[in-house]
């Protein structure tokens, strides 16, 4: 993989022109009362370096005479490593990660100006670490104060995201291989969940089986797993997972696997007792058709919003047929009167982050156009909460529909030919979900 990170850095360096880019690692692991929780590297930092330790800085300096890629890392310290784990150290950082030069992180303030002076701007994304933000700004101000004496150095501070994130939006074959594995693990987990979910069991038992599959295959939860039975499925980000499943409940499971930093994201909804009620099946089939129509819009050259619009039309038409909405379809869509039932978008980019980087729109009217290598989720849903409040002028909801929540989600790769469903291995047709 070392050469892949080098390719990414070189591609970014070619776009920086005469700027110097600074990337900060994620902070140290979160501590609560002397307990250290799992560290996860900043995605941009990992994408460019593969370096998986905290308290590090990467500098890309295209115009420096000797060092275009520089790492600042924690130095070796055997006493501290006994407590917190091995460190790569300065010397090994060059050899293992391909840095032209490496320094102790303690030398950052001393060495950084040399690389900043080689460019005419600083590319740095202002993050959550206010102390580090101010540190970079102080360097910039100091160099600006002495600019008249030199006539060289950085005169602007700019976010590198508009340059870097379009690169991350198009996945390489190597990235896709890892994402396929993340999908494969999640498929196994969801299929097991369908087997073990039974009336009388608890949501957390199903969650445990899902996450056991993740761990057994070298993965971990991509996000807090949602295992929502009955009316809990009408809560979009329900994560308590404490309820006992009842015969007659639908079970909505939204769970994805993170594998080598890349993520999958799958949602399935199925009857705990093996049989849909007529109302449940009616809603389920509307959502399934909405997803089918949406996936058909995932192909090169199609604006990003088309799959959402397709799903909305199917859902609105279905709710009109059931009398859960009334009026003109186009007016309902334009005025978003369907939102009490379907309040979220139909998907998001997927990759190193579950909600991956990349713009969706360029201005008010110009949607991002899909291209081969994009990966996105397609996840329409209908949620009929007992506490639903219809838009003014819309009908009251009959109690027979209350508590039905359905979402169906797959990960779809845009290919040259169309859309490939990476998560197709989890059943979703009605006939595959019912049992005696």
Image (cartoon, rainbow, N blue to C red):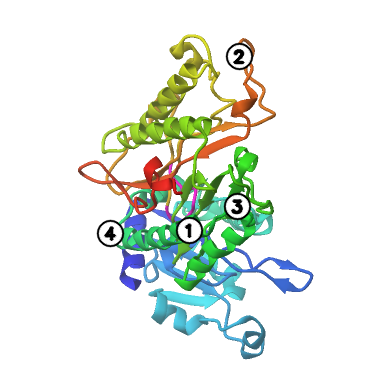
Identify the residue shown where x is 59% and y is 51%. 227
Query: Which residue extends farthest left?
Result: 417
Distance from disc 4 to disc 1, alpha carbons, whole Å, reads 33 Å
The dot on residue 199 is: 3
Distance from disc 3 to disc 1, alpha carbons, whole Å, reads 12 Å
* Disc nearer the start of the sequence (3/4): 4
Task: Please report contact status of discs 4 and 1: CB closer than 8 Å, yes or no.
Answer: no
SS of the residue under disc 2: loop
* Disc nearer the start of the sequence (2/3): 3
Q: Residues within 10 Å of mark 2 (few under 14, many from 20)?
A: few
Query: Which residue extends farthest right?
Result: 33
Distance from disc 2 to disc 4, alpha carbons, whole Å, reads 50 Å
**Range of residues picked out in magenta:** 351-358
Measuring from the top left, give residue 334's x and y in whole percent: 48, 16
SS of the residue under disc 1: helix
* Whether residue 41 is visible: no
Horizontal side of 166 relative to 372 (left or right) equals right
Q: Mark 1 sits on what residue? A: 195
């Amino acid at each position: 993989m070392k050469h892949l990170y080098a390719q990414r850095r070189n591609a970014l360096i070619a776009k920086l022109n005469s700027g110097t880019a600074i990337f900060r690692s994620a902070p140290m692991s979160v501590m609560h009362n002397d307990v250290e929780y799992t560290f996860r590297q900043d995605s941009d930092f990992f994408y460019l370096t593969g370096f998986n330790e905290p308290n590090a800085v990467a500098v890309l300096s295209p115009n420096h005479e000797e060092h275009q890629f520089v790492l600042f890392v924690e130095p070796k310290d055997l006493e501290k490593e006994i407590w917190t784990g091995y460190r790569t150290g300065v010397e090994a950082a060059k050899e293992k990660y391909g840095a032209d030069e490496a320094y102790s992180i303690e030398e950052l303030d001393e060495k950084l100006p040399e690389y900043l002076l080689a460019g005419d701007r600083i590319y740095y994304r202002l993050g959550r670490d206010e102390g580090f933000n101010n540190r970079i700004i102080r360097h910039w101000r100091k160099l600006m104060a002495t600019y008249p004496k030199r006539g060289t150095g950085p005169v602007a501070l700019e976010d590198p995201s508009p340059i870097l994130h379009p690169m991350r939006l198009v996945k390489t074959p190597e990235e896709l291989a890892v994402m396929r594995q993340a999908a494969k693990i999640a498929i196994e987990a969801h299929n097991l969940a369908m087997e073990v979910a039974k009336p009388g069991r608890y949501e957390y038992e199903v969650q445990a089986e899902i996450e056991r599959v993740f761990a057994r295959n070298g993965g971990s939860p991509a996000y807090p797993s949602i295992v929502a039975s009955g009316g809990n499925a009408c809560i979009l980000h329900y994560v308590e997972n404490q309820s006992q499943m009842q015969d007659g409940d639908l079970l909505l499971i939204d769970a994805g696997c993170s594998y080598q930093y890349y993520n999958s994201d799958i949602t399935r909804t199925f009857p705990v007792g093996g049989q849909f009620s007529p109302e449940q099946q009616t809603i389920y089939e509307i959502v399934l058709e909405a997803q089918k129509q949406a996936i058909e819009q995932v192909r090169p050259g199609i604006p990003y919003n088309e799959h959402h619009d397709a799903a909305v039309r199917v859902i609105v038409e279905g709710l009109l047929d059931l009398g859960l909405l009334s009026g003109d379809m186009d007016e309902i869509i334009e005025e978003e009167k369907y939102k009490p039932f379907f309040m979220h978008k139909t998907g998001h980019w997927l990759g190193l982050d579950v909600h991956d980087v990349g713009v969706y729109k360029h201005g008010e009217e110009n949607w991002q156009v899909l291209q081969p290598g994009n990966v996105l989720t397609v996840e329409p849903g209908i949620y009929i909460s007992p506490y639903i409040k219809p838009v003014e002028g819309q009908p009251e909801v009959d109690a027979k529909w209350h508590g039905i929540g359905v979402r169906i989600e797959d990960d779809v790769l845009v290919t040259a030919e169309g859309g490939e469903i990476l998560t197709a291995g989890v059943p979703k047709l009605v006939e595959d979900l019912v049992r005696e």
